[in-house]
Image: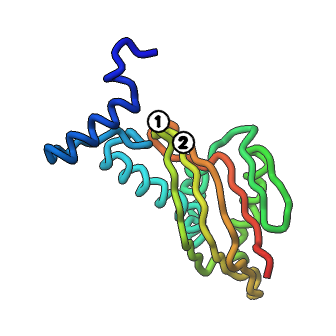
Amino acid sequence: MPLNPLFSSSSLLTLCSFLQKYYILKIKLPSRLDLPSSDKTKNEQEITKTLHDSFGWALTKDRPLFESIFAKDDDFFTYFPDSSTVVGWNEFEKYLDGWMDPRNKAKGYDIRNLRIVISETGEVAWFSAIVDDIGEFDGEPWGAKDIRWTGVLEKRGGKWKICQQHMSEGKR
């Protein structure tokens, strides 16, 4: 129980509402995300770039970029649209050889309906999107359309890292 009922959360909200209504005061109450809006915008931009880089690196086969995007943890995991699951950075990195094969050519990707939520601390974020990813291997086209993509990122050393991701196909 608060020492002074005036400072209970409901009393404070009532007081603020009263002051706003009758005295036209502009009182900004703390939002769910206590980051300054410029920090939130900067984080969203950095996360968006990281997510785009997680597909875009393949267009130029930029291995250092690929390696900078993902958390190199034993508990990192990816759930692929074919229901296969890869656990651990070392296992995930094994896929890189196939992706780096000169016969494999990424042709493009599209990320739509991207939704990003950043934790109150500004150190963790989760996202969802719809993705198309197309290319060819040895002249034969491959691709995935309308893949649902979700995941979690963590800010480490000032950089956003994908710690887990889940890709699945919707029912058609």
Q: In terms of image quadrants, where is residue 58? A: bottom right
Indicate left or right for 38 with 67 as reference: left
* Numbered disc total: 2
Q: How would you rate the neighbour count of disc 2 (Cα within 10 Å): few for under 14, some for 14-19, many for 20 or more?
A: some
Q: Nearer the viewer, residue 125 or 10?
A: 10
Q: Nearer the viewer, residue 135 or 75?
A: 75
Q: Which structural element holds mark 1? A: loop
Direction from residue 137 to residue 50 in the image, left or right: left
Q: Answer above or below: position of 49 versus 32.
A: below
Q: Could you tell me which residue is drawn at 71 percent across and 82 percent down? A: 136
Does 105 sit left or right of 51 as displayed? right
The residue shown at (72%, 80%) is 143
Identify the mark at residue 155; answer none if there is no mark.
Answer: none
- Which residue bears the numbered disc 2? 124
Q: CA distance from mark 2 to mark 1?
A: 7 Å
Dot 2 lies on which element?
Answer: strand
Circles 2 and 1, Cβ within 8 Å, touching? The answer is yes
Q: Nearer the viewer, residue 29 or 74?
A: 29
Out of 149 and 102, give the one closest to the viewer.
Answer: 149
Image position, residue 134 (x, y; %): 66, 80
Give percent across and percent down for residue 125.
54, 47
* Amino acid type of the residue that numbered disc 1 sits on in the rendered structure: Thr
In percent of the image, x 48 and y 60: which residue is there? 48
Name which residue type carries label 2: Val
The residue pinned by badge 1 equals 121
Q: How is colour applied across the structure in the image?
A: rainbow
Please state the horizontal and vertical placement of residue 12, each as a whole percent of the image.
33, 31
